[in-house]
Image: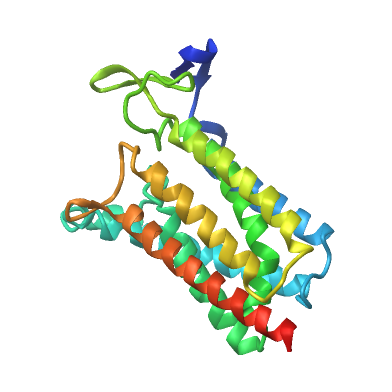
Amino acid sequence: MNIVTFPGLNLSFEVSKIAFTIFGISVYKYAVCIVLGIVLALILSKIAKQKFDIEYNDVLICTVLGIIFGTIGARLYYVIFNLSYYSQNISEIFDFRNGGLAIYGGLILGAITILVYCKIRKINVLNLFDYVVPYVALAQCIGRLGNFFNVEAYGAQTMSIFRMGIRTVEGYIEVHPVFFYELVATLIIFIVLKILQNHRKFEGQIFGLYCLLYSGIRFFLEGIRADSLMLFNLRASQVLSLVIFVCSIVYIIIKTKKDSKTENK
C-alpha cells in the first residue's frame, strides 16, 4: 500500500496496485483500467452506429487485433529501448506482469495490423481510423488512471499546485503527475474529435488531428517525465512525437488544399 498526496490540493490517497485476486493470481488495477477503457470505447462506438460506411463488426475485429498486436508492440518498444537490461535478462522479456509497456509501440504496431486487415478486407483505412480514433483517445484517458495506482509515469520535482507527493527509494519527493496531465489531455482530445467527426471535410482528417494533438501534447509531457526511454541522449518518445507532429501538419495542409481545390471546381 502506497500513500500518494497532492499537497497543493490538500488530498491524500492510500493506493494499492492489486484490484482483486482470483485463484491466487493477483489482478492489477492497471489492467482493470485498460479493460474498462476498451469496453467503454467499444460501447460508445456501438452507440454511434455506422460512420463513414464502416461496419461495427470490423471495428470489433480490429479492436481484438489491435489489443493483441498493440500489446506486443508496446512491449517490444519498451524492450528495445532497455536492451542493455533485457539482453542480460532474456526471460523477463515475456514477464508482462511487472510492467514495461510503451504506448507508442502499441499504437504503431496496432495501426500497422489494422492497416493490413483493411487491405485484405478492402476497407477504407482512413475512414476506419476516423471512426475509431476518438475512442482510442478515450481508452488512453482511462488507461492512464492505471499509472496512478502503480505510482508511475510521473515527472520532475515541482512546487506546482498540482504536484504529487510520493515516496521513492530516495525518500519523499513532490513531482509532476504527468499521467494525470495526459489523462486530462486525452479526454479533451476525445471530446474535440467527437465534435469534429460530424463536420469532417476529408478522409483521414480526424485521424490526422488525433496524431497532431496527441503527439504535440506528448512532446511536452515527455520533456518533464522522470522515466523516459532514451535514444542515445535523446528522449525516444519525444523524438517520435516531433516526427509525427510535423508529418501530421504536412498531411493536414496537403489534404486541406486538395479539398479546397475540389470544392472550387
Whether residue 9 can be seen here:
yes
Residue 62 at x, y percent in the picture: 63, 71
Horizontal side, residue 108 vs residue 209: left or right: left
Residue 242 at x, y percent in the picture: 38, 59
Q: Which residue ends up furthest to the top in the rendered image?
A: 10
Residue at x 76%, y 59% (from the top left corner): 45
Q: Nearer the viewer, residue 140 or 126?
A: 126
The structure's colour scheme is rainbow
Quarter the N terminus occupies: top left
Q: Nearer the viewer, residue 48 or 94?
A: 48
Whether residue 42 can be seen here:
no
* 112 relative to 225, above or below: below
Residue 82 at x, y percent in the picture: 24, 53
Quarter the C terminus occupies: bottom right
Horizontal side, residue 195 vs residue 70: left or right: right
Residue at x 57%, y 75% (from the top left corner): 114
Q: Quadrant of residue 226?
A: top left
Residue at x 43%, y 58% (from the top left corner): 104
